Image (tube, coloured by chain):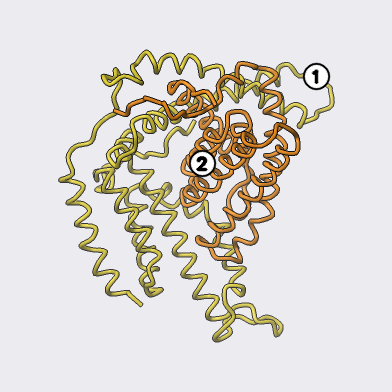
Chain colours: A yellow, B orange
């Protein structure tokens, strides 16, 4: 069961503070949408690809690209709809299939899409669940919201296991030789799984109350990150490289 | 609406969001050219119909966004968060504010379906451009419609099989004296 997408590693991105990673991600997203030259977007995408492979290995580093490959293929196939000005680059039997403007727009949108995908996957693959939550908490996320997220992450594998368990029990109950009605079999499975999961609400609520959820002196605390020195230094380094990049490639 | 115990509110939201993540990501999602079709909408409709707008908002938005992140479609997570969150909120609001009846449920379903299609069209246009986003409208409409029908059936079935669920409606009253850390 995939509970978290974190990949253990020793790269400098792994060592970065989760807060600076989140702020750098935000800046990078803004950067991707700025009006910069196509060559700038492409070079940033290539850099992100290199970083992704460097931090997560070739297989995991390229996995996000593999996932979005169908979308990219469709974008290339639909390129005439993205623009029909300029020179015709591809013509089959008198039909103009690819124009210069369409190709350039698809290249820009495609590389932006790849870049965004790599940015998000890099954050998730190099940050542990606890660090991520502590990062959100330090940005002012209320205690109860952080607690809820940590409970959600705790209950995802349990709920998935419940679904599998109920599915298996329904398979055992099936009468051999009887004609299958997938829909009729599927709905009771869903209902059973939901009811089974909902039954844990009251015990969980009681546990939270016992741990002092509504009290000032709570008996449970979330991990707290250190001061802002390190993240500020990391953000400054990011800006040191990204500001000249924007100035060079600004349209 | 009677104020619910905060511990119960957190528990309900956590469990419902986990159910939404599992329905979205782990019940065999059907890959399409643009992403994947899933049963997340069943869980969102169920949460909003049974537990109200707050549960629909949080379980819908957070659940689908987390599923996107876990499955590797993280770039869609902000769009899913807003679209499905809004879907859950609107369905829950219509159900809770409107008259109890099939017409209200039908109207809530239509609003939910339109919200999903419009939200993903807007998000897809930002990410991939309008022509690509246009192709997603029909699959999204189908996914949301199936989710709506199954959500109604599941909601009815769960209330019948587990009546205490009615007492777990998520509500935050004005006199909520819960203090944060």
**Image point (24%, 48%), residue name:** A12
Chain letter for the residue marked with disc 1 in the picture: A
On residue B102, which mark appears? none
- Work out whether residue B172 or residue B174 is closer to the camera in this orientation and state it: B174
Task: Answer whether labels 1 and 2 touch (C-beta < 8 Å).
Answer: no
Q: Position of residue B160 (x, y in %)?
A: 70, 19
Residue found at the far left of this picture: A229
Q: Which residue is mark 1?
A: A176
Residue B100, compared with residue B41, is above or below; it is above
Q: Is residue A196 above or below residue B133?
A: above
Residue at the spot of label 2: B61
- Residue A224, percent from left and from top: 24, 32
Instruction: Tell me the element at label 1.
Output: loop
Q: Quadrant of residue A112?
A: bottom left
Depth order, front residue of A103/B133? B133
* Above or below, comparing residue B91 to residue A204 in the picture: below
Whole-number angstrom distance, CA of label 1 to CA of label 2: 41 Å
**Subunit bearing disc 2:** B
Q: Residue at x 43, y 23 (%)?
A: B6
């Amino acid at each position: 069961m995939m509970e978290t997408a974190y990949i253990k590693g020793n790269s400098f991105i792994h060592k970065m503070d989760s807060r600076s990673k989140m702020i750098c991600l935000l800046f990078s997203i803004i950067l991707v949408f700025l009006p910069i030259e196509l060559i700038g977007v492409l070079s940033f995408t290539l850099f992100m690809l290199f970083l992704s492979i460097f931090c997560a290995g070739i297989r995991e580093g390229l996995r996000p690209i593999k996932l979005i490959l169908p979308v990219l293929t469709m974008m290339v196939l639909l390129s005439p709809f993205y623009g029909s000005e300029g020179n015709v680059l591809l013509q089959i039997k008198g039909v103009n299939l690819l124009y210069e403007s369409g190709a350039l727009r698809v290249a820009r949108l495609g590389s932006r899409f790849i870049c965004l995908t790599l940015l998000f996957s890099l954050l998730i693959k190099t940050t542990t669940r606890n660090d991520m939550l502590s990062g959100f908490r330090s940005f002012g996320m209320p205690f109860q919201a952080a607690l809820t997220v940590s409970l959600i992450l705790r209950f995802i594998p349990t709920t998935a296991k419940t679904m599998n368990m109920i599915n298996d029990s329904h398979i055992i109950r099936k009468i051999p030789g009887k004609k299958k009605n997938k829909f009729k079999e599927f709905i009771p499975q869903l209902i059973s799984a939901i009811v089974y999961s909902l039954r844990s609400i009251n015990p969980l609520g009681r546990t939270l109350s016992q741990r002092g959820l509504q009290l000032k002196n709570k008996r449970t605390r979330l991990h707290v990150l250190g001061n802002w020195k390190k993240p500020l230094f990391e953000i400054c380094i990011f800006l040191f490289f990204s500001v000249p990049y924007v100035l060079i490639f600004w349209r | 609406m009677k104020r619910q115990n905060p511990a119960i509110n957190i528990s309900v939201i956590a469990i419902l969001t986990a159910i939404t993540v599992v329905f979205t990501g782990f019940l065999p999602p059907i890959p399409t050219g643009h992403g994947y079709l899933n049963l997340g909408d069943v869980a969102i409709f169920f949460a909003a119909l049974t537990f109200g707008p707050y549960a629909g908002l949080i379980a819908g938005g957070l659940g689908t966004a987390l599923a996107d992140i876990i499955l590797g479609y993280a770039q869609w997570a902000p769009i899913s968060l807003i679209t499905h969150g809004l879907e859950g909120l609107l369905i829950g609001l219509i159900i809770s504010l409107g008259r109890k009846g099939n017409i209200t449920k039908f109207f809530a379903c239509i609003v939910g379906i339109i919200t999903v299609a419009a939200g993903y069209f807007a998000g897809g246009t930002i990410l991939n451009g309008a022509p690509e986003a246009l192709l997603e409208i029909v699959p999204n409409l189908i996914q949301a419609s199936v989710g709506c029908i199954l959500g109604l059936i599941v909601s009815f079935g769960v209330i019948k099989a587990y009546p205490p669920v009615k007492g777990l409606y998520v509500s935050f009253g004005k006199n909520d004296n819960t203090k944060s850390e």
